[in-house]
């Protein structure tokens, strides 16, 4: 418990129905992040530290979709079930939700791209981010890299992330890239000790 200090925030990246089993862009074993994230949520809620959650919030003709020549099937359309957070995640009402990917012409893997995340973190006095969610090799990777560039200390919750793994080594390579960028890998046992 002594690990946390004022200025800390939990950042949950893109844990949305379309990225979970049955979704249009389901990530293998994506649902496994939910029990892990719930433990972190309880810890941050108990400590009264801010909780942020990013979400893809795409228009129907988003540039990342197959129909527009993009790499992905249609997913996380704004205002649809697929874009919602799963009820099992049990995000508290105080969660600050950050929407991204709303510009049809812009891909937005990073939670900071084209969003108010940086401003909201500054307004909350956040200096250290504890990051988990989906997917390790895309949105988690880009969010962590940009957080480091913006000067945040970043702890990567390695037991609360899952990769798409188009290639089997994509997830491990992404974790290595985040650590190389200065993120500190962290597990629940270390944080809750």
Image (cartoon, rainbow, N blue to C red):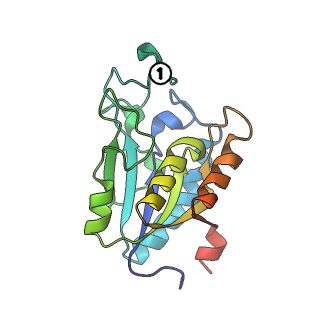
Q: Quadrant of residue 176?
A: bottom right
Q: Quadrant of residue 80?
A: top left
Residue lying at the far right of the rendered structure:
168
Would you name the residue on which mark 1 appears? 70
Residue lying at the far bottom of the rendered structure:
2
Task: Report whether 193 appears left or right of 123.
Answer: right
Check the image and report above or below for 2 versus 190.
below
Residue beneath the point at 34% across and 36% down:
57
Residue beneath the point at 37% across and 50% down:
112
- Image quarter of the C terminus: bottom right
Q: Is residue 102 visible?
A: yes
- Image quarter of the N terminus: bottom right
Q: Residue 129 placed where, x, y %?
A: 46, 66
Q: Is residue 158 visible?
A: no
Q: Residue 29 placed where, x, y %?
A: 65, 42
Check the image and report above or below for 111 versus 21.
below
Q: Residue 114 placed where, x, y %?
A: 31, 43
Residue beneath the point at 45% across and 58% down:
149
Q: Residue 144 placed where, x, y %?
A: 50, 55
Task: Report whether 121 appears left or right of 22.
Answer: left
How many marks are shown on the rendered structure? 1
Secondary structure under the numbered disc 1 in the rendered image: loop
- The crowd level at tag 1 (other Cα within 10 Å; few <14, some 14-19, many 20+) is few
The residue nearer to you, when weighing 5 against 33, is 5
The residue nearer to you, when weighing 87 against 23, is 23
Q: Quadrant of residue 84?
A: top left
The residue nearer to you, when weighing 88 against 138, is 138
Task: Report whether 115 appears left or right of 91.
Answer: left
């Amino acid at each position: 418990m002594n690990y946390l200090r004022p200025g800390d925030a939990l950042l949950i990246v893109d844990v949305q129905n379309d990225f979970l089993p049955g979704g249009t862009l389901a990530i293998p074993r994506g649902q496994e992040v939910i029990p892990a994230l719930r433990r972190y949520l309880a810890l941050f809620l108990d400590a009264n530290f801010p909780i942020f959650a990013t979400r893809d919030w795409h228009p129907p003709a988003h540039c990342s979709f197959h129909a527009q020549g993009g790499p992905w099937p249609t997913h996380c359309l704004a205002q649809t079930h697929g874009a919602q957070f799963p009820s099992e995640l049990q995000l508290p009402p105080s969660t600050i939700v950050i929407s991204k990917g709303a510009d049809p012409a812009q891909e937005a893997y990073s939670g900071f791209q084209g969003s108010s995340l940086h401003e909201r973190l500054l307004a909350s006095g956040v200096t250290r981010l504890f990051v988990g969610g989906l997917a390790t090799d895309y949105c988690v990777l880009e969010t962590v890299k940009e957080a480091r560039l913006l000067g945040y200390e970043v702890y990567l919750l390695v037991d609360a992330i899952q990769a798409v793994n188009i290639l089997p080594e994509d997830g491990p390579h992404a974790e290595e890239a985040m650590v190389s960028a200065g993120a500190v890998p962290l597990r629940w046992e270390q944080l809750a000790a």
